[in-house]
Image (cartoon, rainbow, N blue to C red):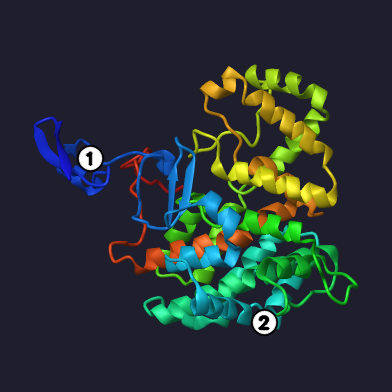
């Protein structure tokens, strides 16, 4: 541990530095004309609110790791449920432990008929994220024991329930939008293939997706499983800090993800590619961006100042998908856009590299999903990360209910006059 001496007016103190941080409460020993000294950090761009051992990101180096394992290795060699166990349990599951985990998840995929009724109560054309958020939040009333967050066994049971039921709810929300009957989960399909079956099965006696599509979605799920303290994860942790169950907390996370600045970026990429229209118009578009006449969607990231490691993996997955579905004309525009931008000093100097959203929307569109389902496809895999973060929050003895300070800017000591 190191420290540094800080001075403010007549006050001075030695402030300890631990893990590259100082305790914000240490600043209280410095008085100001507005009370004890505080920090002001809109958007929490330089504030650590928790200690976490789940996900590590080095944005400058383009590194993403779950529990210390590089995302590239997990995308190549793991499955989504194996990755979910890693995030939640902190270790790789093998043998009987893995078999037990898979059995637990499969056992809890069905949802109560009343949950279906909640989804049915929405207009068919209501946004599927609204249906997902309402259905997930309602689960607390079906499992009231989930409020007993001090019991580790009960926490685990409800974590498994939500992880298992999320794709079922998401698929039901999608089919309700189409006016189609619900498809029950089946025991003979894996997690991802079962999800695809619940969404896309029609008259087949047995649904069989192309293995390349299944693997591509599996990879997307792994890449989206967690991403440290982003907006929706912070929402989950904030609601959890009040003593809430996982269903209520993850419902808040879904609400945060619903925001276009968080979960809607891949849809914005598709809109941009359509506006460009053709490969020969890419140079013109690039010049427009450099002159402030447009935005390059899917490039740059709040965290990454290098090539987003997830984007490299997704680009390869997109190739596999288009082998099955045929090449989306927008892909050619995207590839040319990436090629030019990565060779242009304007974007290089600003550290604008493709992020995870640049290719993911193309994959979801190739699967036949409408844009409003893209964020749902984000929420389903992110459930593993949200649950891991929820568990870490409620079991951390150092955590308290989240209640930030403010800088008051309004009037004071006014006199209220009636009439």
Choose between 101 and 140: the one closer to the eye: 101
Question: Does 117 sit left or right of 355 as displayed?
Answer: right
- Residue 22, image quadrant: top left
Q: Is residue 320 above or below residue 130?
A: above
Quarter of the picture containing the N terminus is top left
Where residue 293 appears, x then y in whole percent? 68, 21
Q: Earlier in the sequence, mark 1 or mark 2?
A: 1
Label 2 neighbourhood size at 10 Å, few (<14), some (14-19), many (20+)? few
List the residue tagged with mark 2: 112
Q: Which of 135 and 216 is in front in this view?
A: 216
| Dot 2: element | loop
Percent position of residue 129, x then y: 67, 59
Say which residue appears at 33% left-offset and 41% top-offset. 412
Residue under pointer 1: 37
Answer whether residue 123 is visible to the viewer in this image: no
Residue 315 lies in quadrant: top right
Residue 331: image x %, image y %? 77, 38
**Residue that appears at 79% across and 31% down:** 275
In depth, the one of 87 and 416 nearer the eye is 87
- The reply to whether residue 236 is in sight is yes
Residue name at image x 54 percent, y 56 percent = 74
Task: Decide if residue 235 is on the left or right side of residue 224.
Answer: left
- The kind of secondary structure element at disc 1 is loop
């Amino acid at each position: 541990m190191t420290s540094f001496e800080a001075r403010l007016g007549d006050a001075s103190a030695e402030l300890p530095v631990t893990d590259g941080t100082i305790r914000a409460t240490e600043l209280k020993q410095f008085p100001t004309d507005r009370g004890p000294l505080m920090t002001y950090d809109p958007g929490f761009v330089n504030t650590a609110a928790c200690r976490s051992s789940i996900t590590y990101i080095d944005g400058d180096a383009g590194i993403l790791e779950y529990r210390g394992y590089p995302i590239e290795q997990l995308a190549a060699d793991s499955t989504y449920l194996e990755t979910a166990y890693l995030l939640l349990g902190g270790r790789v599951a093998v043998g009987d432990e893995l078999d037990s985990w898979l059995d637990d998840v499969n056992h809890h995929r069905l949802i109560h008929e009343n949950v279906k009724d909640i989804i049915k109560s929405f207009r068919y054309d209501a946004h599927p994220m609204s249906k997902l958020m309402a259905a997930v939040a309602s689960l607390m009333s079906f499992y009231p024991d989930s409020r007993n967050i001090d019991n580790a066994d009960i926490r685990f049971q409800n974590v498994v329930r939500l992880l298992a039921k999320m794709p079922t709810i998401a698929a039901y929300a999608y089919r309700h939008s189409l006016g189609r009957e619900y498809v029950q989960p089946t025991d003979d399909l894996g997690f991802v293939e079962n999800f695809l079956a619940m969404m896309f099965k029609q008259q087949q006696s047995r649904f069989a997706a192309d293995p390349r599509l299944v693997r591509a979605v599996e990879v997307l799920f792994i890449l989206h499983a967690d991403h440290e303290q982003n907006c929706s994860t912070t929402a989950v942790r904030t609601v959890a800090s009040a003593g809430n169950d996982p269903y209520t907390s993850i419902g808040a996370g879904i609400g945060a993800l619903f925001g276009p600045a968080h979960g809607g970026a891949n849809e914005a990429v598709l809109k941009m590619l359509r506006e460009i229209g053709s490969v020969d118009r890419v140079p013109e578009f690039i010049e427009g961006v450099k002159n402030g006449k447009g935005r390059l969607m899917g490039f740059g990231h709040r965290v990454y100042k290098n090539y987003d490691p997830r984007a490299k993996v997704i680009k390869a997955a997109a190739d596999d998908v288009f082998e099955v579905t045929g090449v989306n004309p927008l892909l050619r525009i995207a590839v040319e856009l990436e090629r030019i931008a990565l060779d242009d000093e304007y974007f290089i100097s600003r550290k604008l590299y493709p992020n995870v959203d640049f290719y993911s929307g193309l994959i979801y569109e190739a699967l036949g999903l409408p844009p409003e389902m893209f964020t749902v496809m984000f929420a389903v895999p992110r459930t593993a990360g949200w649950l891991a973060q929820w568990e870490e929050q409620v079991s951390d003895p150092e955590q308290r209910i989240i209640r930030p300070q403010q800088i008051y800017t309004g009037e004071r000591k006014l006199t209220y006059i009636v009439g």
